[in-house]
Image (spheres, rainbow, N blue to C red):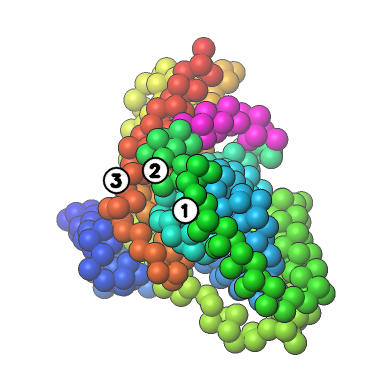
Amino acid sequence: MFEYLTLGIFGLAFVFIVIERFDKSLAALLGALLMVIFRILTPEEAIHAIHFETILLLMAMMILVNIASKSGIFEWLNVKIAAFTKGNPLAIFLLFSLLTAVFSAFLDNVTTVILIVPLTIELVRGMGKDPKPYIFAEIIFSNIGGGLTLIGDPPNIIIGGATGFNFLDFVVNLWIPILFVSILTMIVFLLKNWRTIKPISDKLIDLTIANIIIRKVKIKFVKKTIHLDFVIKVILALIATIIGFMLQGYLQLPNYVIAFTAAIILAIVTTKKINIHESFSSVEWTTLLFFAGLFVMVAGIEKTGVLEQLSHLVANSTDNIFILALIVLWVSGVVSMILDNIPFVTVMIPVIAGIQASFGATDVSILWWALSLGACLGGNGTLIGASANVISADIAKKHGVNISFLGYMKFSLPLTFGILLVCSGYLYFATL
């Protein structure tokens, strides 16, 4: 009865999130409250279930990006990108997708989409194009890029901490599947959206419009007062934040402490140029509350033992390393489409460690890479599968671009299954 009630509450909340009759944060918070009201979790357990490190990291980056935006650096970047691409939709698409993947490997993917999605919307929509394909690409490439490195996505951080794998270990073992997944994703996007993003060099009207938009962006930028000292402070703060994330293991400080330190110091040194009340009000509270509610609901499911049973089912299914890796990949990939991947990875770590011990001297490190690929890339499947997905959709909505749950999933779900198939091929050759 306890398990059915818990799964029923989560399922009901999930349905409301999908049909979007009201804001998804309300559905998640209602589900979380029902977990407490029906005594599935105690109030203390519910509070403990919220990953405040994730919430605080998101909050810090929202404040940092808002303060940075006041310097005009993002408008400057917008002008440079517009001028470099000459308003060519294909060039814009390729450039933004590449930047998203690269930035997500060295920043966390949430920070990347906070920086890039608003720029994309302003530039693409100004040209009269639909920004949704561009945003979809940035969501998916942020998760692909984040899956490459130790610091790119939370599951990798957890796996690295449990195994001792370092930054280079992740890159060496994952660059091949990430490369082929990136190629597949790019091909699918180009084929699916060619009419929207194809070059316009042979279309005089579109080319004229693009040049007008670029000129408009430049004029808008010229009218904006740029303070060089402000820009320098912003650049230094952003660089310091990136370096801090990369050296997080040596600093022994949580990422949210690094991000908040950069945000607060930048606010102090630029206090005459910004309104701190506006910066604090820029925090997307509905997004943070959605994550809080989701964390509580997942904790309720975790308490039923369903996730633990699932992990043990994987462990006892076979003694063939390739099949085991395949099961870990697909189970973690599918689960990460609908549940937060952090608790699942946490539950799977002792299971894989136990499998590793039972195989003795046999190298079963491929199971860790299967877990990483499934957890990081499976989140592409739905709009709630990864933090970057949720943040991107909320940023888009704030800029008047509505991305529905089903609208995103119609494109992303088949692509994600294709991505997992590519990873399956990698696992096969890696276990030969």
First in sequence: mark 2 vs mark 3: 2
Residue closest to the eye, 125 or 324: 125
Residue closest to the eye, 226 or 17: 226
Q: Does the magenta stretch include residue 183?
A: yes
Q: Where is residue 166 in the image (x, y as percent from the top left)?
A: 69, 38
Residue farthest to the top, as pictured: 432
Disc on res. 194: none
Looking at the image, is mark 1 or mark 2 nearer the viewer? Answer: 1
First in sequence: mark 1 vs mark 2: 2
Q: Tell me if 367 is positioned left or right of 41 in this view.
A: right
Q: Label 2: how many residues lie within 10 Å, few (<14), some (14-19) or many (20+)?
A: few
First in sequence: mark 1 vs mark 3: 1
The residue stretch that appears in magenta: 168-185
Q: Which residue is drawn at 35% across and 59% down?
A: 403
Residue under pointer 2: 195
Q: Where is residue 140 in the image (x, y as percent from the top left)?
A: 47, 46
Residue under pointer 3: 410
Residue under pointer 1: 205
Residue farthest to the front, as pictured: 204
Q: Position of residue 338 (x, y in %)?
A: 34, 50
Q: Which amino acid lies under the numbered mark 3 shown in the image of this protein?
A: Lys
Spatial separation of the CA atoms under disc 1 and disc 3: 32 Å
Q: Label 3: how many residues lie within 10 Å, few (<14), some (14-19) or many (20+)?
A: few
Q: Is residue 174 visible?
A: yes
Give the quarter of the figure containing the N terminus: bottom left
* Magenta: main secondary structure: helix
Q: Residue at x 58, y 68 (%)?
A: 216
Spatial separation of the CA atoms under disc 1 and disc 2: 16 Å
